Amino acid sequence: MSYIGIDIGTSSIKAVLLGERQDELAEATVPLTLQRPQPGWSEQDPEAWWQATLQVLQVIRRQAPEAFAKLSGIGLSGQMHGAVLLDASGRVLRPAILWNDGRSAAECQELMATVPDLTRRAANIAMPGFTAPKLLWVRHHEPEIFRSIAKVLLPKDYVRWRLTGHFVSDMSDAAGTLWLDVARRAWDPVLIEACGLGLEHMPDLVEGSADSAPLKADLAAEFGLAGRRVAVAGGGGDNAASAVGIGAVDAGEGFLSLGTSGVLFAVTDRLAAAPERTLHAFCHAVPERWHAMAVMLSAASSLSWAADLVGRGEDVGGYLADIEAFAADPAARATAPIFLPYLSGERTPHNDALATGMLAGLRAGQGAPAIGYAVLEGVAFGFADGLSVLNDAGAGLSSCMLVGGGARSAFWAQMLADILALPLDLAEGAEKGAAFGAARLAMLAAGAGTVETVCKRPAVGRRFEPDPAAGERYQPRLARFRALYPAERAAR
């Protein structure tokens, strides 16, 4: 048997074909484009997702025809929060409004006022990234389109509908709409009605590892699968699917993603929420599990910014080596600038789109390595703030994988372990991503095993153990870091 995972991303559609032992048999990627018709807007054409999905399936079929002919399951992951609006005939009414669209700030305030207990119901605060305020914006600004809406789907669930003919979502993706009672794993009619919609506008709900519907017969025939029942799994939001891919499925497990943005992801066996501190609390893609996420908007991108600033953008590896040499001098390290990594605002714990980056404590004689060191340390301090929120919410981590492009720096990884006082495991094959996790969900939906047997953790290539003495040395600088944001905000 074989299993495909498809990730409906913002920049591309990715797919991977796995065999029964989770060996990768084929992979394919088709790029996507983004439309920004006005400043702060972000949209895509759902038809582009579908055509790209057909392309990746065709490529994988050509790469591994014999394995493809034994396809038993398809798993879907995708960019969360997007709004795909369909009329009663299934026609897309307008381009999908994406997760990184900022037009609905006023509607967020309206939702919070209309449903005073929204954070209790949804376990999250209203933010423009979520789906519900987008629909309220359409209601206010595009009333004719709003009146024609028959179904609201998330991006991956639109692709599911094209694959199966069924309107279904999973718990993890649905948790990012602000319409789900995250604790109960069910739609909340009060939250839905606050946007002028009803339960009839929502897809059905299944767990991410469940069989949501079979591949349509005509598509099965088109791909040489006639007579086979190919289960399409419930799937998951991109971060939840990535967690499944690295085996983070039990309480206390998680990952630190040191990518363009930064994510601390922690699995829990109950809802752990702290909406007032911008902790994202969602259902996991496997049953009876939830997850909490602390999100920072500028992580590895802060290093790219600093490298460009000092003219080292074409030699980031060499720049990191210079930073490490600088840090070998304790006196230089202790007097380095302090950096606030809020170059694009900040999410956890401040929820402040207007927050700005800052280099404080610059001295004559400090050069590019001092600035680079401050940036690495400031990003690590930002993760420390996120971990503090997770711990306070009862979503602490007992084990943590390290993923993302920034994880290639052993120096930065050790700094993070020391500051967080948390062992970080750099796993072999941990970069497989959401498509790999979606393929694992396809295996579960097709009955190829249990969560315990399918969602195993990869082998650890290297562990970064925290050094308590080093962690203690960072504390005075962490205190200075935490004093800067309140001062910056008060000065606006």
Image: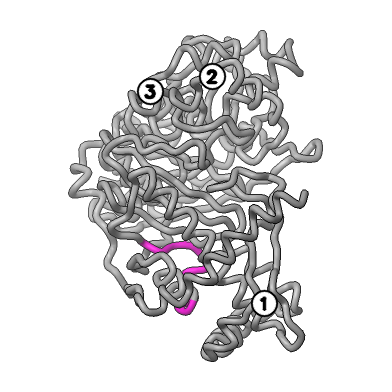
Report the amino acid beneath label 3. Leu
Q: Which x, y percent locates residue 452?
A: 19, 47
Q: Nearer the viewer, residue 223 or 479?
A: 479
Judged left or right of residue 425, residue 129 is right
Taking 297 as reference, is 414 above or below it? below
Instruction: Say which label, 2 or 1, has the lower sequence index.
Output: 2
Q: Disc 2, disc 1: CB below 8 Å?
A: no
Q: Which residue is mark 1?
A: 371
Report the amino acid beneath label 1. Ile
User: Which residue is found at the position 64% from the left and 62% from the top?
Assistant: 340
Instruction: Say which label, 3 or 2, has the lower sequence index.
Output: 2
Disc number placed over residue 383 in the picture, else none = none
Q: Which x, y percent locates residue 221?
A: 40, 31
Q: Dot 3: within a 10 Å radius of its alpha carbon, few (fewer than 14), some, or many (20 or more) residues?
A: some
User: Which residue is found at the position 32% from the left and 41% from the top?
Assistant: 441
User: Which residue is found at the position 62% from the left and 70% from the top?
Assistant: 375
Between label 1 and label 3, give the one nearer the viewer. 1
Q: Disc 3, disc 2: CB below 8 Å?
A: no
Taking 284 as reference, is 145 above or below it? above
